[in-house]
Image (cartoon, rainbow, N blue to C red):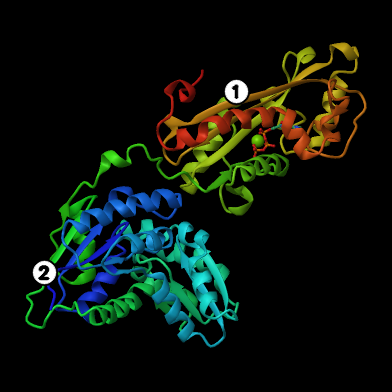
Amino acid sequence: MNTQPIGFIDSGVGGLTVVKEALRQLPNENVVFLGDQARLPYGPRPAAQVRAFTWQMVNFLLQQQIKMLVIACNTATAAALPDIRQKLNIPVVGVIVPGSRAAIKATSTNHIGVIGTEGTVKSNAYADTIHGKAAHIKVTSLAAPKFVPLVESNEMTSPVAKRVVAETLQPLLHQGIDTLVMGCTHYPLLRPLTQNVMGDDVTLIDSGAETVSEVSMLLDYFDIAAGPKTQATRVFYTTGNAKMFDVIAGNWLGLKVNAQHVTIDAEATDHLPAAAPQTVVIASKNAGKVKELAAMFEADGLSVKSLADFPDLPTVPETGETFEENARLKADGYASALELPVVADDSGLMVDALDGAPGVFSARYAGRGHNDAANNAKLIANLAEVAPEQRTATFHTTLVFAKPNDPDHDLVVNGEVKGQITGVPEGDNGFGYDPYFFLPALGKTMAQLTSSEKNQVSHRGNAMRALEKQWQQWFTGKEDAHETRRSE
Ligand SMILES: O=c1nc[nH]c2c1ncn2[C@H]1C[C@H](O)[C@@H](COP(=O)(O)OP(=O)(O)OP(=O)(O)O)O1
Ligand SMILES: [Mg+2]
Protein backbone atom coordinates (compact mmCIF):
# COMPACT_ATOMS: atom_id res chain seq x y z
CA MET A 1 0.00 0.00 0.00
CA ASN A 2 1.28 3.40 -1.04
CA THR A 3 -0.51 6.58 0.02
CA GLN A 4 1.69 9.04 -1.83
CA PRO A 5 -0.40 11.10 -4.27
CA ILE A 6 -0.76 10.66 -8.00
CA GLY A 7 0.28 13.86 -9.77
CA PHE A 8 -1.69 15.35 -12.67
CA ILE A 9 -0.50 18.24 -14.81
CA ASP A 10 -2.25 20.25 -17.50
CA SER A 11 -2.03 23.64 -19.17
CA GLY A 12 -5.30 24.64 -17.49
CA VAL A 13 -8.56 23.21 -16.22
CA GLY A 14 -8.83 20.62 -18.99
CA GLY A 15 -6.83 18.09 -17.01
CA LEU A 16 -9.69 18.06 -14.53
CA THR A 17 -11.61 15.85 -16.93
CA VAL A 18 -8.94 13.27 -16.18
CA VAL A 19 -9.04 13.96 -12.45
CA LYS A 20 -12.81 13.55 -12.44
CA GLU A 21 -12.44 10.14 -13.96
CA ALA A 22 -9.69 9.29 -11.45
CA LEU A 23 -11.94 10.24 -8.53
CA ARG A 24 -14.60 7.97 -9.98
CA GLN A 25 -12.40 4.98 -10.84
CA LEU A 26 -9.83 5.35 -8.06
CA PRO A 27 -11.61 6.94 -5.08
CA ASN A 28 -8.96 5.84 -2.58
CA GLU A 29 -6.11 7.60 -4.30
CA ASN A 30 -4.68 10.89 -3.12
CA VAL A 31 -4.53 13.38 -5.95
CA VAL A 32 -2.47 16.49 -6.56
CA PHE A 33 -3.22 18.60 -9.63
CA LEU A 34 -1.33 21.51 -11.16
CA GLY A 35 -2.80 23.65 -13.96
CA ASP A 36 -0.55 26.16 -15.71
CA GLN A 37 -3.28 28.66 -16.50
CA ALA A 38 -0.92 31.63 -16.41
CA ARG A 39 0.74 30.35 -19.57
CA LEU A 40 -2.27 28.83 -21.27
CA PRO A 41 -2.85 27.90 -24.06
CA TYR A 42 -0.05 25.45 -24.80
CA GLY A 43 -1.53 24.44 -28.17
CA PRO A 44 0.04 27.20 -30.31
CA ARG A 45 3.44 27.18 -28.57
CA PRO A 46 6.58 25.69 -30.10
CA ALA A 47 7.22 22.13 -28.91
CA ALA A 48 10.51 23.09 -27.22
CA GLN A 49 8.73 25.63 -25.08
CA VAL A 50 5.94 23.21 -24.16
CA ARG A 51 8.65 20.78 -23.09
CA ALA A 52 10.30 23.42 -20.89
CA PHE A 53 7.01 24.43 -19.25
CA THR A 54 6.04 20.80 -18.72
CA TRP A 55 9.34 20.09 -16.97
CA GLN A 56 8.72 23.02 -14.61
CA MET A 57 5.34 21.57 -13.68
CA VAL A 58 6.87 18.12 -13.23
CA ASN A 59 9.56 19.49 -10.93
CA PHE A 60 6.92 21.21 -8.82
CA LEU A 61 4.93 17.99 -8.40
CA LEU A 62 8.02 15.93 -7.65
CA GLN A 63 8.42 18.10 -4.55
CA GLN A 64 4.98 16.84 -3.47
CA GLN A 65 6.34 13.27 -3.41
CA ILE A 66 4.11 11.92 -6.15
CA LYS A 67 4.27 8.19 -6.85
CA MET A 68 3.03 8.42 -10.43
CA LEU A 69 2.73 11.24 -12.97
CA VAL A 70 -0.16 11.72 -15.37
CA ILE A 71 0.44 14.23 -18.15
CA ALA A 72 -3.22 15.14 -18.52
CA CYS A 73 -2.58 17.34 -21.54
CA ASN A 74 -2.31 16.14 -25.10
CA THR A 75 -0.04 18.96 -26.24
CA ALA A 76 2.41 18.27 -23.40
CA THR A 77 2.20 14.52 -23.95
CA ALA A 78 3.04 14.92 -27.63
CA ALA A 79 5.95 17.25 -26.86
CA ALA A 80 7.45 15.85 -23.66
CA LEU A 81 6.31 12.36 -22.66
CA PRO A 82 9.26 10.32 -23.96
CA ASP A 83 11.79 12.69 -22.41
CA ILE A 84 10.07 12.81 -19.03
CA ARG A 85 9.44 9.08 -18.92
CA GLN A 86 13.08 8.41 -19.63
CA LYS A 87 14.33 10.71 -16.86
CA LEU A 88 11.93 9.95 -13.99
CA ASN A 89 11.99 6.81 -11.90
CA ILE A 90 8.23 6.79 -11.28
CA PRO A 91 5.63 5.63 -13.84
CA VAL A 92 4.63 8.37 -16.28
CA VAL A 93 1.38 8.15 -18.21
CA GLY A 94 0.31 10.29 -21.16
CA VAL A 95 -3.09 10.63 -22.78
CA ILE A 96 -2.33 9.82 -26.40
CA VAL A 97 -1.72 6.06 -26.32
CA PRO A 98 -4.82 5.25 -24.23
CA GLY A 99 -6.99 7.48 -26.46
CA SER A 100 -5.62 5.89 -29.61
CA ARG A 101 -6.16 2.39 -28.27
CA ALA A 102 -9.79 3.10 -27.37
CA ALA A 103 -10.44 4.65 -30.79
CA ILE A 104 -9.06 1.62 -32.61
CA LYS A 105 -11.30 -0.58 -30.50
CA ALA A 106 -14.38 1.53 -31.23
CA THR A 107 -14.18 2.12 -34.99
CA SER A 108 -15.93 -0.14 -37.45
CA THR A 109 -15.67 2.08 -40.54
CA ASN A 110 -11.90 2.23 -39.95
CA HIS A 111 -12.00 5.99 -40.23
CA ILE A 112 -11.13 7.87 -37.04
CA GLY A 113 -11.33 11.62 -36.58
CA VAL A 114 -9.04 13.41 -34.14
CA ILE A 115 -9.54 16.92 -32.81
CA GLY A 116 -6.76 18.57 -30.85
CA THR A 117 -4.76 21.74 -30.39
CA GLU A 118 -2.50 22.99 -33.18
CA GLY A 119 0.49 21.52 -31.33
CA THR A 120 -1.07 18.08 -31.00
CA VAL A 121 -2.29 17.99 -34.59
CA LYS A 122 1.05 19.23 -35.89
CA SER A 123 2.93 16.57 -33.92
CA ASN A 124 0.87 13.91 -35.69
CA ALA A 125 1.05 11.95 -32.43
CA TYR A 126 -2.42 10.36 -32.69
CA ALA A 127 -2.10 9.40 -36.35
CA ASP A 128 1.36 7.94 -35.72
CA THR A 129 0.20 6.00 -32.65
CA ILE A 130 -2.92 4.67 -34.37
CA HIS A 131 -1.00 3.71 -37.51
CA GLY A 132 1.71 2.10 -35.39
CA LYS A 133 -0.93 -0.31 -34.10
CA ALA A 134 -3.27 -0.55 -37.10
CA ALA A 135 -1.90 0.79 -40.36
CA HIS A 136 -5.13 0.26 -42.31
CA ILE A 137 -7.11 2.80 -40.33
CA LYS A 138 -7.64 6.21 -41.87
CA VAL A 139 -7.08 9.11 -39.49
CA THR A 140 -8.34 12.62 -40.20
CA SER A 141 -7.01 15.24 -37.79
CA LEU A 142 -8.35 18.72 -37.24
CA ALA A 143 -7.08 21.52 -35.03
CA ALA A 144 -9.76 23.11 -32.86
CA PRO A 145 -7.82 25.97 -31.28
CA LYS A 146 -10.92 27.90 -30.26
CA PHE A 147 -12.18 25.19 -27.90
CA VAL A 148 -9.66 25.73 -25.08
CA PRO A 149 -10.43 29.45 -24.61
CA LEU A 150 -14.17 28.64 -24.51
CA VAL A 151 -13.64 26.17 -21.68
CA GLU A 152 -11.20 28.33 -19.75
CA SER A 153 -13.63 31.24 -19.85
CA ASN A 154 -16.41 28.98 -18.55
CA GLU A 155 -18.41 29.40 -21.77
CA MET A 156 -19.14 25.71 -22.26
CA THR A 157 -22.84 26.11 -23.01
CA SER A 158 -23.10 29.62 -24.46
CA PRO A 159 -24.48 30.35 -27.95
CA VAL A 160 -20.95 31.35 -28.97
CA ALA A 161 -19.68 27.92 -27.96
CA LYS A 162 -22.46 26.29 -29.92
CA ARG A 163 -21.59 28.24 -33.06
CA VAL A 164 -17.83 27.72 -32.71
CA VAL A 165 -18.19 23.97 -32.18
CA ALA A 166 -20.55 23.62 -35.17
CA GLU A 167 -18.26 25.65 -37.45
CA THR A 168 -15.07 23.95 -36.35
CA LEU A 169 -16.33 20.40 -36.79
CA GLN A 170 -17.87 21.01 -40.21
CA PRO A 171 -14.93 19.51 -42.17
CA LEU A 172 -15.29 16.19 -40.31
CA LEU A 173 -18.90 15.57 -41.30
CA HIS A 174 -20.07 13.19 -44.06
CA GLN A 175 -16.74 11.40 -44.41
CA GLY A 176 -17.54 8.07 -42.84
CA ILE A 177 -15.90 8.94 -39.53
CA ASP A 178 -17.58 6.81 -36.85
CA THR A 179 -15.17 7.56 -33.98
CA LEU A 180 -13.89 10.93 -32.88
CA VAL A 181 -11.02 11.30 -30.43
CA MET A 182 -11.34 14.34 -28.20
CA GLY A 183 -7.60 14.81 -28.28
CA CYS A 184 -7.38 17.60 -25.73
CA THR A 185 -8.45 17.21 -22.13
CA HIS A 186 -10.45 20.43 -22.33
CA TYR A 187 -12.73 19.07 -25.02
CA PRO A 188 -14.86 16.66 -22.93
CA LEU A 189 -16.28 19.78 -21.29
CA LEU A 190 -17.74 20.54 -24.74
CA ARG A 191 -18.91 16.96 -25.19
CA PRO A 192 -22.68 17.60 -25.49
CA LEU A 193 -22.17 20.24 -28.19
CA THR A 194 -19.66 18.03 -29.97
CA GLN A 195 -21.96 14.99 -29.94
CA ASN A 196 -24.78 17.12 -31.21
CA VAL A 197 -22.81 18.29 -34.24
CA MET A 198 -21.22 14.92 -35.04
CA GLY A 199 -24.47 12.98 -34.58
CA ASP A 200 -25.36 10.11 -32.28
CA ASP A 201 -23.74 7.49 -34.50
CA VAL A 202 -20.26 8.83 -33.84
CA THR A 203 -18.49 7.47 -30.76
CA LEU A 204 -16.62 10.17 -28.87
CA ILE A 205 -13.41 9.01 -27.24
CA ASP A 206 -12.39 10.80 -24.07
CA SER A 207 -8.65 10.25 -23.99
CA GLY A 208 -8.46 11.39 -20.39
CA ALA A 209 -10.99 8.85 -19.17
CA GLU A 210 -9.18 6.11 -21.05
CA THR A 211 -5.94 7.22 -19.42
CA VAL A 212 -7.32 6.57 -15.95
CA SER A 213 -7.89 2.92 -16.85
CA GLU A 214 -4.21 2.75 -17.70
CA VAL A 215 -3.31 4.44 -14.39
CA SER A 216 -5.41 1.90 -12.55
CA MET A 217 -3.67 -0.96 -14.27
CA LEU A 218 -0.20 0.44 -13.56
CA LEU A 219 -1.01 0.96 -9.87
CA ASP A 220 -1.64 -2.75 -9.67
CA TYR A 221 1.27 -3.70 -11.87
CA PHE A 222 3.75 -1.75 -9.73
CA ASP A 223 1.83 -2.61 -6.58
CA ILE A 224 1.57 1.01 -5.47
CA ALA A 225 -2.21 1.44 -5.09
CA ALA A 226 -3.54 3.16 -1.95
CA GLY A 227 -5.45 0.86 0.37
CA PRO A 228 -9.20 0.97 0.94
CA LYS A 229 -8.92 2.70 4.29
CA THR A 230 -7.23 5.81 2.94
CA GLN A 231 -8.92 9.12 3.66
CA ALA A 232 -8.20 10.50 0.22
CA THR A 233 -7.01 14.07 -0.23
CA ARG A 234 -7.34 16.20 -3.36
CA VAL A 235 -5.04 19.17 -3.66
CA PHE A 236 -5.26 21.68 -6.50
CA TYR A 237 -2.70 24.23 -7.62
CA THR A 238 -2.95 26.76 -10.41
CA THR A 239 -0.45 29.27 -11.75
CA GLY A 240 -3.44 31.45 -12.72
CA ASN A 241 -6.48 32.89 -11.03
CA ALA A 242 -7.50 30.56 -8.17
CA LYS A 243 -11.07 31.90 -7.89
CA MET A 244 -11.88 31.23 -11.52
CA PHE A 245 -10.29 27.81 -11.18
CA ASP A 246 -12.45 27.03 -8.13
CA VAL A 247 -15.64 27.87 -10.01
CA ILE A 248 -14.89 25.68 -13.03
CA ALA A 249 -13.34 22.86 -11.01
CA GLY A 250 -16.11 22.93 -8.42
CA ASN A 251 -18.82 22.65 -11.07
CA TRP A 252 -17.04 19.99 -13.01
CA LEU A 253 -15.98 17.78 -10.12
CA GLY A 254 -18.99 18.41 -7.90
CA LEU A 255 -16.63 19.20 -5.02
CA LYS A 256 -15.78 22.25 -3.04
CA VAL A 257 -12.43 23.19 -4.51
CA ASN A 258 -10.02 25.54 -2.84
CA ALA A 259 -7.12 25.88 -5.22
CA GLN A 260 -3.84 27.47 -4.22
CA HIS A 261 -2.13 29.90 -6.50
CA VAL A 262 1.52 29.04 -7.14
CA THR A 263 4.31 30.51 -9.20
CA ILE A 264 6.49 27.95 -10.88
CA ASP A 265 9.97 28.95 -11.76
CA ALA A 266 8.99 32.11 -13.63
CA GLU A 267 12.59 33.28 -13.70
CA ALA A 268 13.71 30.30 -15.68
CA THR A 269 11.04 30.96 -18.28
CA ASP A 270 11.60 34.68 -18.75
CA HIS A 271 13.91 34.20 -21.66
CA LEU A 272 11.53 31.92 -23.49
CA PRO A 273 9.48 33.49 -26.25
CA ALA A 274 5.71 33.66 -25.80
CA ALA A 275 3.72 31.71 -28.31
CA ALA A 276 3.97 33.14 -31.80
CA PRO A 277 0.96 32.70 -34.03
CA GLN A 278 1.07 29.88 -36.54
CA THR A 279 -1.61 31.36 -38.74
CA VAL A 280 -1.75 34.85 -40.15
CA VAL A 281 -4.84 36.37 -41.69
CA ILE A 282 -4.07 38.65 -44.61
CA ALA A 283 -6.79 41.25 -44.34
CA SER A 284 -7.13 42.06 -48.02
CA LYS A 285 -9.77 41.48 -50.66
CA ASN A 286 -7.23 41.84 -53.44
CA ALA A 287 -6.28 38.36 -54.67
CA GLY A 288 -3.04 39.66 -56.21
CA LYS A 289 -1.81 41.07 -52.92
CA VAL A 290 -2.90 38.00 -50.98
CA LYS A 291 -0.98 35.74 -53.33
CA GLU A 292 2.23 37.74 -52.95
CA LEU A 293 2.01 38.13 -49.17
CA ALA A 294 0.95 34.50 -48.69
CA ALA A 295 4.00 33.25 -50.58
CA MET A 296 6.28 35.25 -48.31
CA PHE A 297 4.56 34.26 -45.04
CA GLU A 298 4.44 30.62 -46.08
CA ALA A 299 8.16 30.73 -46.77
CA ASP A 300 8.49 31.72 -43.10
CA GLY A 301 6.59 28.59 -42.07
CA LEU A 302 3.25 30.20 -41.28
CA SER A 303 -0.09 29.13 -42.59
CA VAL A 304 -2.11 31.86 -44.19
CA LYS A 305 -5.75 32.78 -44.39
CA SER A 306 -7.33 35.73 -46.15
CA LEU A 307 -10.64 37.54 -46.06
CA ALA A 308 -11.87 35.08 -48.68
CA ASP A 309 -11.96 32.53 -45.81
CA PHE A 310 -14.39 34.78 -43.90
CA PRO A 311 -16.94 35.73 -46.55
CA ASP A 312 -19.50 37.12 -44.12
CA LEU A 313 -17.23 39.73 -42.61
CA PRO A 314 -18.29 43.33 -43.30
CA THR A 315 -15.76 45.39 -45.29
CA VAL A 316 -13.77 47.93 -43.29
CA PRO A 317 -14.03 51.30 -45.10
CA GLU A 318 -10.77 53.01 -46.11
CA THR A 319 -11.52 56.52 -44.92
CA GLY A 320 -7.95 57.54 -44.06
CA GLU A 321 -5.83 60.11 -45.88
CA THR A 322 -2.56 58.21 -45.80
CA PHE A 323 -1.47 54.66 -46.57
CA GLU A 324 -0.70 54.16 -42.91
CA GLU A 325 -4.09 55.36 -41.71
CA ASN A 326 -5.87 53.05 -44.13
CA ALA A 327 -3.64 50.09 -43.34
CA ARG A 328 -4.26 50.66 -39.63
CA LEU A 329 -8.01 50.92 -40.17
CA LYS A 330 -8.04 47.63 -42.06
CA ALA A 331 -5.67 45.81 -39.70
CA ASP A 332 -7.35 46.96 -36.47
CA GLY A 333 -10.84 46.55 -37.88
CA TYR A 334 -10.38 43.03 -39.17
CA ALA A 335 -8.28 41.89 -36.19
CA SER A 336 -11.04 42.88 -33.79
CA ALA A 337 -13.77 41.39 -35.94
CA LEU A 338 -11.92 38.10 -36.33
CA GLU A 339 -10.26 38.05 -32.89
CA LEU A 340 -7.11 36.97 -34.68
CA PRO A 341 -3.79 38.59 -35.53
CA VAL A 342 -3.95 40.07 -39.02
CA VAL A 343 -1.74 41.83 -41.52
CA ALA A 344 -3.22 44.56 -43.73
CA ASP A 345 -1.63 46.20 -46.76
CA ASP A 346 -2.45 49.62 -48.08
CA SER A 347 -0.60 50.42 -51.22
CA GLY A 348 -0.62 52.46 -54.35
CA LEU A 349 1.20 54.16 -57.15
CA MET A 350 2.64 57.68 -56.82
CA VAL A 351 3.50 59.35 -60.10
CA ASP A 352 5.86 62.33 -59.82
CA ALA A 353 4.44 64.21 -62.82
CA LEU A 354 0.97 63.91 -61.23
CA ASP A 355 2.11 65.25 -57.84
CA GLY A 356 1.95 61.83 -56.27
CA ALA A 357 -1.45 60.81 -57.68
CA PRO A 358 -3.20 58.41 -57.66
CA GLY A 359 -1.54 57.62 -54.26
CA VAL A 360 -3.98 56.46 -51.60
CA PHE A 361 -6.73 56.67 -54.20
CA SER A 362 -5.05 54.14 -56.49
CA ALA A 363 -7.76 51.51 -56.13
CA ARG A 364 -10.52 53.99 -56.96
CA TYR A 365 -8.66 56.33 -59.31
CA ALA A 366 -11.29 55.90 -62.01
CA GLY A 367 -14.13 55.75 -59.51
CA ARG A 368 -15.47 53.32 -56.92
CA GLY A 369 -15.18 49.63 -57.56
CA HIS A 370 -11.96 47.86 -58.41
CA ASN A 371 -11.44 48.19 -62.10
CA ASP A 372 -7.76 47.91 -62.98
CA ALA A 373 -8.38 48.55 -66.68
CA ALA A 374 -10.24 51.81 -66.03
CA ASN A 375 -7.59 52.95 -63.54
CA ASN A 376 -4.82 52.24 -66.03
CA ALA A 377 -6.67 54.02 -68.85
CA LYS A 378 -7.06 57.13 -66.72
CA LEU A 379 -3.39 57.01 -65.73
CA ILE A 380 -2.21 56.81 -69.33
CA ALA A 381 -4.58 59.58 -70.42
CA ASN A 382 -3.27 61.89 -67.68
CA LEU A 383 0.33 61.19 -68.71
CA ALA A 384 -0.27 61.65 -72.45
CA GLU A 385 1.66 64.96 -72.55
CA VAL A 386 4.48 63.85 -70.26
CA ALA A 387 7.83 62.89 -71.82
CA PRO A 388 9.04 59.33 -71.13
CA GLU A 389 11.98 60.39 -68.93
CA GLN A 390 9.61 62.41 -66.74
CA ARG A 391 7.27 59.51 -66.11
CA THR A 392 9.02 58.45 -62.92
CA ALA A 393 6.87 56.78 -60.29
CA THR A 394 7.00 54.95 -56.98
CA PHE A 395 4.99 52.00 -55.74
CA HIS A 396 4.42 52.26 -51.99
CA THR A 397 3.16 49.69 -49.45
CA THR A 398 2.42 50.15 -45.79
CA LEU A 399 1.93 46.87 -43.93
CA VAL A 400 0.33 46.87 -40.50
CA PHE A 401 0.36 43.81 -38.27
CA ALA A 402 -2.30 44.01 -35.54
CA LYS A 403 -3.28 41.89 -32.59
CA PRO A 404 -6.99 41.81 -31.74
CA ASN A 405 -8.23 44.77 -29.69
CA ASP A 406 -4.80 46.30 -29.22
CA PRO A 407 -4.62 49.18 -31.75
CA ASP A 408 -2.00 51.06 -29.73
CA HIS A 409 0.63 48.45 -30.43
CA ASP A 410 0.38 47.89 -34.15
CA LEU A 411 3.57 47.01 -35.99
CA VAL A 412 3.97 49.33 -38.99
CA VAL A 413 6.46 48.94 -41.84
CA ASN A 414 6.84 50.55 -45.26
CA GLY A 415 8.34 49.51 -48.58
CA GLU A 416 8.86 51.26 -51.89
CA VAL A 417 10.22 50.65 -55.37
CA LYS A 418 10.98 53.19 -58.08
CA GLY A 419 10.27 52.83 -61.79
CA GLN A 420 8.73 54.49 -64.83
CA ILE A 421 5.26 54.43 -66.34
CA THR A 422 5.38 53.06 -69.89
CA GLY A 423 3.00 54.02 -72.69
CA VAL A 424 2.44 50.45 -73.80
CA PRO A 425 1.53 47.71 -71.33
CA GLU A 426 3.73 44.60 -71.21
CA GLY A 427 3.28 41.29 -69.39
CA ASP A 428 0.38 39.27 -67.98
CA ASN A 429 1.53 38.56 -64.44
CA GLY A 430 0.83 40.58 -61.29
CA PHE A 431 -2.17 42.86 -61.01
CA GLY A 432 -3.27 46.49 -60.92
CA TYR A 433 -0.78 48.89 -62.47
CA ASP A 434 1.91 46.23 -62.99
CA PRO A 435 1.83 46.10 -66.83
CA TYR A 436 2.68 49.83 -66.97
CA PHE A 437 5.32 49.89 -64.24
CA PHE A 438 8.73 49.55 -65.89
CA LEU A 439 11.87 48.69 -63.93
CA PRO A 440 14.86 50.14 -65.83
CA ALA A 441 17.39 47.97 -63.99
CA LEU A 442 15.61 44.79 -65.13
CA GLY A 443 14.40 46.05 -68.50
CA LYS A 444 10.95 44.65 -67.73
CA THR A 445 7.61 45.73 -66.38
CA MET A 446 6.38 44.31 -63.07
CA ALA A 447 3.88 42.21 -65.02
CA GLN A 448 6.74 40.50 -66.87
CA LEU A 449 8.19 39.13 -63.63
CA THR A 450 7.17 35.89 -61.96
CA SER A 451 5.64 36.43 -58.54
CA SER A 452 8.83 35.40 -56.77
CA GLU A 453 10.91 37.74 -58.97
CA LYS A 454 8.43 40.50 -58.21
CA ASN A 455 8.68 39.85 -54.48
CA GLN A 456 12.45 40.27 -54.65
CA VAL A 457 12.24 43.85 -55.91
CA SER A 458 8.74 45.10 -55.16
CA HIS A 459 7.46 47.60 -52.62
CA ARG A 460 5.56 44.75 -50.96
CA GLY A 461 8.63 42.53 -50.89
CA ASN A 462 10.67 45.34 -49.34
CA ALA A 463 8.00 46.00 -46.71
CA MET A 464 7.78 42.28 -46.00
CA ARG A 465 11.54 42.06 -45.42
CA ALA A 466 11.26 44.87 -42.89
CA LEU A 467 8.36 43.05 -41.24
CA GLU A 468 10.21 39.74 -41.08
CA LYS A 469 12.96 41.33 -39.00
CA GLN A 470 10.53 42.46 -36.32
CA TRP A 471 7.28 40.64 -36.18
CA GLN A 472 8.26 37.63 -34.05
CA GLN A 473 9.64 39.85 -31.36
CA TRP A 474 6.78 42.30 -31.63
CA PHE A 475 4.27 39.49 -31.31
CA THR A 476 5.79 38.23 -28.11
CA GLY A 477 5.33 41.67 -26.58
CA LYS A 478 8.95 42.73 -26.37
CA GLU A 479 8.71 45.22 -29.22
CA ASP A 480 10.77 48.35 -29.49
CA ALA A 481 8.37 51.24 -28.96
CA HIS A 482 10.09 53.31 -31.65
CA GLU A 483 9.19 50.88 -34.34
CA THR A 484 5.58 50.60 -33.45
CA ARG A 485 4.44 54.01 -32.32
CA ARG A 486 2.18 55.96 -34.62
CA SER A 487 4.39 57.55 -37.21
CA GLU A 488 2.25 60.59 -38.02
O1 LIG B 1 2.05 45.46 -56.54
C1 LIG B 1 1.21 46.14 -57.14
N1 LIG B 1 1.11 46.10 -58.47
C2 LIG B 1 0.18 46.78 -59.15
N2 LIG B 1 -0.72 47.57 -58.55
C3 LIG B 1 -0.64 47.65 -57.21
C4 LIG B 1 0.30 46.98 -56.46
N3 LIG B 1 0.14 47.26 -55.18
C5 LIG B 1 -0.89 48.08 -55.11
N4 LIG B 1 -1.36 48.33 -56.34
C6 LIG B 1 -2.54 49.13 -56.68
C7 LIG B 1 -3.73 48.22 -56.81
C8 LIG B 1 -4.84 49.03 -56.21
O2 LIG B 1 -5.37 49.85 -57.24
C9 LIG B 1 -4.14 49.92 -55.20
C10 LIG B 1 -4.16 49.34 -53.82
O3 LIG B 1 -5.33 49.72 -53.13
P1 LIG B 1 -5.61 49.11 -51.69
O4 LIG B 1 -6.79 49.75 -51.09
O5 LIG B 1 -4.35 49.12 -50.91
O6 LIG B 1 -5.90 47.60 -52.02
P2 LIG B 1 -7.20 46.90 -52.56
O7 LIG B 1 -8.40 47.82 -52.38
O8 LIG B 1 -6.94 46.42 -53.93
O9 LIG B 1 -7.37 45.66 -51.61
P3 LIG B 1 -7.55 45.69 -49.99
O10 LIG B 1 -7.84 47.12 -49.59
O11 LIG B 1 -8.69 44.79 -49.71
O12 LIG B 1 -6.27 45.18 -49.44
O13 LIG B 1 -2.79 50.04 -55.64
MG1 LIG C 1 -8.76 48.85 -50.70
Q: Which mark is residue 233?
A: 2
* x 43%, y 25%: residue: 480
Outermost residue, bottom direction?
108
Give 116 or 3, whichever is nearer the viewer: 3
In the image shown, does 10 or 62 lie closer to the viewer?
Answer: 62
Q: Position of residue 252 (x, y in %)?
A: 24, 69
Most extreme residue toward the right is 424
Residue in the foreground of this view, choosing between 253 and 168: 253
Badge number at residue 333: none
Mark nearer the N terminus (2 vs 1): 2
Residue occupied by mark 1: 322
Residue 282, image x and y in percent?
60, 43
Q: Quadrant of residue 163?
A: bottom left
For ligand 1, which image quadrant applies? top right
Apparent side of residue 19 relative to residue 470 in the rendered image (left or right)? left
Asked whether residue 377 is in view, the answer is no
